């Protein structure tokens, strides 16, 4: 029987399970993972920092719907990727991190070995679904298949598998054949029937669609039309309902005034959302009527937002079944288009007043880019405005670090997304301070020749934090950092750059960047003119 070092067998196993790309950085501890990559037919993307590798794997997963995979070394490599793991955990992204760890004879002994940590497995477990050590080849294979089985059937969250250095280098037989994978649980027919009856009896129903409902967006659109319901989406649910829906409040759930509309409802249906703090920015949704909640994660059905009808199961399957149950129903809604469109206008005006001057930039950006553009945004004011005012006509095309809220996400995530979708347009939106976190990954985009427009919003400070300090009556401090000449910096990496002074020039820079044979940094400031 043919054997290979386990590190090589792992790459062959991943290839057999549909993995075509791995993001990572080789080191002396995980070098055996790199022995079989090319032979297995896997493309490896060399990040400049393990944080970048993790965000690339995240972006790849969000863009493709497949698992993002990263290889990192013991100790600092794993520590560096823990921030992306935490982001993937909060945003339900399927990321598999494979790391090395100390040899079996050295673990927990404290011999002062290279890259030694007191408890590497436990450290990673704080930011992922599970973190487990594979003591031998058979265990490594079982854990990899366990990860893919859970990606297919449960809430998608990152996993960490660590393999001792000596085990990675030991010869092993090939992994077993690809097993059958379980499907996601389908909601019980009784629950669907009860939900349909409650919806058909309602006069002012409201749906709230979250990121967990993305795969059921076609059924969601039919259900909304058949029921005459009004709709909010969370930021992660943008595009599930198209902008042509007459009763669509948009992604304005976090607007304080949205609670008043919830109070007008006689039924609220929350599909695929945990109604987290960053979805609402208040403690309560605002309704006094019954609530139906549908979620694949039972934890979400037992939180601070109790439902009259909690439904455990896949949101897309629920929407398909509900669509069938509503066939022939004539809605008796009392919602009106004027009522909702005027509310949206007020929401947008409030957004513009809070962060003035950004809405026109967002409008110009959307006008210049193709409808199928995929966005990766960072924790920056231009993204906060865009998430509320830029309508999406399709789901899963605007990706943001919602829950964990880390800076530096957009650039490496856009690189991973572009690697995944190849010719499709991908745009990164990042602030000047956030760019400092992962700017080195610009070299990866240049190296791979990725035509990514990188919109760099430069207001010269941590403006959101400064505003927070002012609201708290704290004299602003530690909010201004010296910036480089960003255009020269981009050019030093081998990227293109542009510094448009008007919105028309901005639009032209975007169009040109999409046609370039590498990334283009588009530097804009609050001084950009109409």
Image (cartoon, helix red, strand yellow):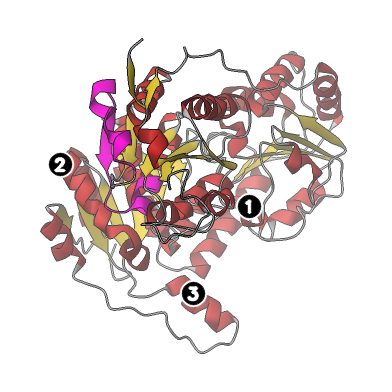
Residue 369 disc label: none
- The segment highlighted magenta reads 30-55
Give 490 or 235, whichever is nearer the viewer: 490
Indicate the position of residue 487 as horizontal and vertical percent values: 17, 63
Residue 516 disc label: 2
Q: Secondary structure at mark 3?
A: helix
Q: Which residue is disc 3 drawn over?
A: 465
Instruction: Tell me if 511 is positioned left or right of 331 in this view.
Output: left
Mark 2 burial class by Cα count in 10 Å: few <14, some 14-19, many 20+: some
Q: Residue at x 51, y 58 (%)?
A: 405
Q: Secondary structure at mark 2?
A: loop
C-alpha span from label 1 to label 2: 36 Å
3 or 1: tag closer to the N-terminus:
1
Q: Are marks 1 and 2 in contact (CB under 8 Å)?
A: no
Indicate the position of residue 244 as horizontal and vertical percent values: 53, 34
Quadrant of the image containing the C terminus:
bottom left
Q: Considering only vertical position in the picture, is 130 above or below 83? A: above
Q: Which residue is disc 1 drawn over?
A: 279
Q: Secondary structure at mark 1?
A: helix
């Amino acid at each position: 029987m043919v054997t290979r070092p386990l590190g090589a067998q792992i790459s062959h196993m991943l290839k057999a399970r549909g993995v075509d790309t791995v993001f990572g950085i080789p080191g002396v501890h995980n070098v055996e993972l790199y022995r079989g990559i090319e032979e297995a037919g896997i493309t490896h993307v060399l990040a400049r920092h393990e944080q970048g590798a993790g965000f690339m794997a995240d972006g790849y997963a969000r863009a493709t719907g497949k698992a993002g995979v990263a290889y990192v070394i013991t100790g600092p490599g794993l520590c560096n990727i823990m921030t992306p793991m935490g982001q993937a955990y909060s945003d339900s992204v399927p990321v598999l991190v494979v790391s090395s760890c100390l040899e079996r004879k050295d673990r927990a002994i404290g011999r002062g070995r290279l890259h030694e940590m007191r408890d590497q497995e436990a450290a990673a477990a704080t930011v992922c679904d599970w973190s487990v050590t594979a003591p031998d080849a058979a265990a490594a294979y079982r854990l990899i298949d366990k990860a893919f089985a859970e990606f297919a059937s449960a809430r998608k969250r990152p996993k960490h598998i660590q393999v001792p250095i000596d085990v990675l280098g030991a010869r092993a037989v090939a992994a077993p054949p690809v097993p059958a994978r379980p499907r996601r649980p389908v909601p019980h027919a009784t629950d669907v029937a009860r939900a349909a009856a409650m919806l058909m009896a309602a006069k002012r129903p409201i749906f709230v669609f979250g990121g967990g409902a993305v795969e059921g967006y076609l059924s969601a659109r039919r259900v909304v039309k058949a029921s005459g319901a009004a709709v909010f989406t969370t930021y992660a649910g943008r595009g599930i309902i198209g902008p042509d829906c007459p009763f669509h409040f948009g992604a304005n759930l976090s607007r304080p005034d949205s609670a008043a509309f919830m109070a007008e409802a006689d039924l609220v249906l929350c599909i695929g959302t945990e109604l987290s703090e960053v979805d609402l920015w208040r403690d309560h949704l605002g309704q006094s009527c019954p609530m139906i909640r549908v979620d694949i994660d039972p934890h979400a059905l037992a939180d601070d937002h109790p439902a009259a009808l909690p439904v455990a199961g896949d949101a897309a399957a629920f929407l398909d079944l509900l669509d069938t149950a509503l066939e022939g129903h004539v809605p008796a809604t009392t919602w009106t288009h004027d009522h909702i469109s005027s509310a949206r206008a007020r929401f947008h005006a409030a957004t513009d007043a809070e962060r003035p001057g950004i809405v026109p930039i967002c409008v110009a950006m959307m006008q210049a880019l193709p409808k199928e553009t995929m966005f990766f945004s960072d924790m920056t004011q231009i993204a906060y405005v865009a998430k509320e005012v830029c309508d999406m006509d399709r789901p899963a095309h605007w990706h943001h670090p919602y829950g964990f809220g880390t800076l530096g996400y957009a650039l490496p995530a856009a690189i991973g997304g572009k690697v995944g979708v190849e010719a499709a347009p991908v745009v990164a939106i990042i602030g000047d301070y956030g760019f400092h976190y992962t700017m080195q990954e610009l070299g990866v985009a240049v190296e791979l020749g990725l035509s990514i427009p990188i919109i760099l919003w430069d207001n010269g400070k941590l403006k959101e934090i400064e505003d927070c300090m002012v609201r708290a009556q704290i004299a602003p401090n530690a909010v201004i950092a010296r910036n480089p000449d960003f255009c020269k910096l981009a050019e030093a990496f081998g990227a293109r750059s542009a510094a448009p002074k008007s919105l028309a020039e901005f639009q032209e820079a975007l169009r040109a960047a999409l046609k370039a044979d590498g990334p283009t940094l588009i530097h804009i400031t609050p001084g950009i003119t109409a």
